[in-house]
Image (tube, grey):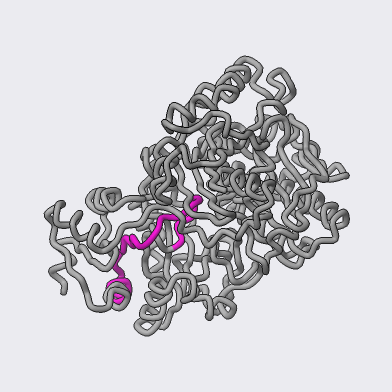
């Protein structure tokens, strides 16, 4: 079957294509529209479809809309209650109005599509498939426990269940208004950040505080039993005054973030302990926005009862596009293959890149050994924009659309945050050769190819890698193997030969408020506007004039 998956109902609109159980393509609309998160998560944006990413997925496979056997849409209006608890009563009916008409909207966006081929997949079921079916066999793909948690689906906020022979059994659904995801969104807004967008900033801020308010927070956030939680009705102002947007958070704000983070982790461990007892499964797979909380993920891996924990790299709503398509393939009796990696988006070959660089009328070179040339620049403390292969599906830069730096220079943290226009309390991540990761990092699963866990940095390495060590002595690690990414693995090897360090700083190639770079034109625009020294785009190098003069 040829199945196009679509996510559009809340935020992070995306499309994915699954053909005969195999993932062919997946991309987020923000990478095409250049609008971060694609749209706001409000009812009156529900009509906005990921038109560009849908068309690209079909083009990638050489298909037309008429060739599709089904289109999954990751929200089922039959399960929604617009006047129920946790709903925006004034506006929810509008969301449903759009969703109920989405087959016709999709047919308009994809001329030739039969509207009857559109199938509604429950939101959390789509999330579950994106984890339980997409995971590799060694992580239990198709035979595992699965847990999904986010702000909300139709009328629930989390799902706990299991996969056996690729079929889902749901064991618990959390009714709204209780929602760990919505509570964290409320906290994000209370701390002066943008909700449904900046929750990762709250996680970083929590490391600067202590859980001094944990007892009070536990009154409203905790595990209730039978796979369910309490998570609503927090009186934020009674805990701290709100932080205004643009203001620097105080220590009290950091303490609140730490307290909520700790309470959420406790609640998750309660649910997952119950899930393990109910299923007896060795492996846990996770998705949903809450599963992007790397700190919680590491605690689950360390203290939870499962032998392994695998998190969908596109754990947010974008991942439901892939999950919805996989779910329909499984229901049709097809064997669903694990996702091959996160690099599922657009790519350009050497000739296409050369033509674009010629068109831009800028000087560039083609070194005989790109990895060695870039390693030399990094060893000399250059900031390198690294644009290689297919773009990543999900919010993490994983060596395809990355900004790289030398981890030995402690000043590179401030330097990168300035380049990107980010808050200075936010850390940057290490990219490490998989073969060396175990001697430098501990306390989290290894290998860690998708940067979804935090690890303790061994004390003997902290002074050697100051740019990537967070205030609490941890780092959000990405491991790189030559089998998965030979070019980036070679770059790490060449950098180690020069510096003695098998680690590079890796952060996303973008600036504040903008999505990650996706196309070569995006890369050139970012390079032209930000103080980055080198652009490595395919096999080519573009240098700043000042940098070129140092050769």
Quadrant containing the C terminus in the rendered view:
bottom left
Q: Is residue 435 magenta?
A: no
Q: Is residue 154 above or below residue 456?
A: above
Magenta span: chief secondary structure: loop
In the rendered image, is residue 476 in sight?
A: yes
Q: Is residue 383 magenta?
A: yes
Residue at 49 percent across and 26 percent down: it is 105
Q: Is residue 120 above or below residue 198?
A: above
Give left or right: position of 193 versus 85.
left
Residue nearer the viewer, 325 or 391: 325
Q: Residue drawn at (55%, 38%), measured in percent from left and top?
A: 71
Q: Nearer the viewer, residue 143 or 473?
A: 143
Q: How many marks?
A: 0
x and y percentages locating residue 169 in the rendered image: 79, 48
What residue sits 54% from the left and 66% below the top?
449
Q: Is residue 169 left or right of residue 385?
A: right
Question: Is 452 left, or right, of 539 in this rendering?
Answer: right
In the rendered image, the vertical position of residue 223 relative to residue 21, given as above or below = above
Q: Position of residue 424 (x, y in %)?
A: 44, 51
Q: Position of residue 55 (x, y in %)?
A: 40, 40
x and y percent of residue 288 in the render?
63, 45
Q: Nearer the viewer, residue 527 or 361?
A: 361
Range shown magenta = 375-398
């Amino acid at each position: 079957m040829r199945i196009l998956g679509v996510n559009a109902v809340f935020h992070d609109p995306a499309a994915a294509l699954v053909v005969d159980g195999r993932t062919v393509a997946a991309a987020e609309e923000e990478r095409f529209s250049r609008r971060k998160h694609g749209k706001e998560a409000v009812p009156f944006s529900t009509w906005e479809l990921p038109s560009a990413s849908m068309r690209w997925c079909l083009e990638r496979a050489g298909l037309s809309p008429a060739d599709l056997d089904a289109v999954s849409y990751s929200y089922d209006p039959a399960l929604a209650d617009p006047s129920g608890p946790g709903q925006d009563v004034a506006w929810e009916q509008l969301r449903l109005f759009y969703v109920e008409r989405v087959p016709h909207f999709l047919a308009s966006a994809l001329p030739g599509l039969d509207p009857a081929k559109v199938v509604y997949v429950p939101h959390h079921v789509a999330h579950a498939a994106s984890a339980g079916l997409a995971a590799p066999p060694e992580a239990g793909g198709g035979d595992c426990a699965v847990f999904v948690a986010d702000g909300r689906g139709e009328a629930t906020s989390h799902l706990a269940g299991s996969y056996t022979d690729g079929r889902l059994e749901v064991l618990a659904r959390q009714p709204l208004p209780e929602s760990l995801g919505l509570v964290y969104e409320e906290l994000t807004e209370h701390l002066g950040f943008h909700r449904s967008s900046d929750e990762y900033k709250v996680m970083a801020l929590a490391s600067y505080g202590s859980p001094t308010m944990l007892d009070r927070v536990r009154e409203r956030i905790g595990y209730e039993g039978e796979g369910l939680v309490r998570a609503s009705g927090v009186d934020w102002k009674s805990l701290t005054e709100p932080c205004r947007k643009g203001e620097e958070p105080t220590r009290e704000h950091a303490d609140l973030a730490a307290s909520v983070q700790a309470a959420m982790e406790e609640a998750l461990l309660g649910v997952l302990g119950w899930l393990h007892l109910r299923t007896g499964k060795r492996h846990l797979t996770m998705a949903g926005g809450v599963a992007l909380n790397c700190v919680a993920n590491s605690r689950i891996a360390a203290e939870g009862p499962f032998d392994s924990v695998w998190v969908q790299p596109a754990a947010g709503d974008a991942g439901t596009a892939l999950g919805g398509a996989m779910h329909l393939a499984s229901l049709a009796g097809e064997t669903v293959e694990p996702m091959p990696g996160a690099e599922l988006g657009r790519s350009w070959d050497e000739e296409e890149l050369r033509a674009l660089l010629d068109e831009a009328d800028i000087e560039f070179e083609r070194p005989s050994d790109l990895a060695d040339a870039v390693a030399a620049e990094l060893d000399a403390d250059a900031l390198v924009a690294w644009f290689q292969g297919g773009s990543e599906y999900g919010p993490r830069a994983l060596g395809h659309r990355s900004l790289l730096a030398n981890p030995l220079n402690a000043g590179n943290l401030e330097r990168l945050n300035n380049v990107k226009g980010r808050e200075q309390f936010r850390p940057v991540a290490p990219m490490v050769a998989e073969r060396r990761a175990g001697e430098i990092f501990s306390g989290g699963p290894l290998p860690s190819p998708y940067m979804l866990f935090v690890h303790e940095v061994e004390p003997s390495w902290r002074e050697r890698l100051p740019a990537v060590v967070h205030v609490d002595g941890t780092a959000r690690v990405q491991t790189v193997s030559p089998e998965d990414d030979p070019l980036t693995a070679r770059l790490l090897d060449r950098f180690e030969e020069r510096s003695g360090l098998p680690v590079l700083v890796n952060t996303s190639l973008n600036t504040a408020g903008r999505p990650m770079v996706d196309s070569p034109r995006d890369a050139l625009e970012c390079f032209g506007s930000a103080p980055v020294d080198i652009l490595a785009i395919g096999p080519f190098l573009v240098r700043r004039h000042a940098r070129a003069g140092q050769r």
